[in-house]
Image: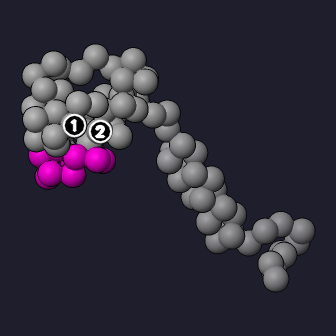
Amino acid sequence: MILIRNGRYPDRILLALLLFVCLSVSSCKKSEPVDHASQGRAHGDKGEYDKSWQDVHKAQSLGAQLAPDFLEQLRKASGRKE
């Protein structure tokens, strides 16, 4: 139950609500190709090839042009063509 003072929410509840809204909006950032390309490289460096390919495909679907050398290294390391 929310306590009401003089018909207004208590200051702490209002502050918590504003903080929640700000954090929610900031976490809804648009997916960027460069983010997925960077994550793909990081996953590949750790040997997480399935995750790396997922990020590579996402980056490409968003219009990123990935370095051919990187893609060739990932193909060889993962044993996959795509």
Nearest the eye: 24 or 41 = 41
| Amino acid on which disc 2 is placed | Trp
Question: Residue 6 shows which numbered tag?
Answer: none
Mark 1: few, some, or many residues within 10 Å (few <14, many ≥20)? Answer: few
Place of residue 71 in the rendered image (x, y in percent of width and height, measured from the top left): 18, 27
Residue 72, image quadrant: top left
- Residue at position x 33%, y 38% in the image: 55
Position above or below: 54 against 34 = below
Q: Position of residue 77 (x, y in %)?
A: 10, 41
Q: Is residue 12 magenta?
A: no
Badge nearest the viewer, 2 or 1: 1
Residue 80: which disc?
1
Magenta part of the protein: which range? 43-51
Give the answer, above or below, for where 54 lies relative to 16: above
Q: Which residue is mark 2?
A: 53
What's the residue at 54%, 43% (across, down)? 28
Residue type indicated by callout 1: Arg
The C terminus sits in image quarter: top left
Task: Let me know if residue 29 appears in the view.
Answer: yes
Mark 2 or 1 closer to N-term? 2
- C-alpha distance separating marks 2 and 1: 9 Å
Q: Position of residue 25 (x, y in %)?
A: 57, 45
- The reply to whether discs 2 and 1 touch (Cβ–Cβ < 8 Å) is yes
Q: Position of residue 14 (x, y in %)?
A: 69, 63
Residue at image coords 43%, 23% = 62
Using residue 47 as the reference point, say whether residue 33 is left or right of it.
Answer: right
The secondary structure type at the circle numbered 2 is: helix
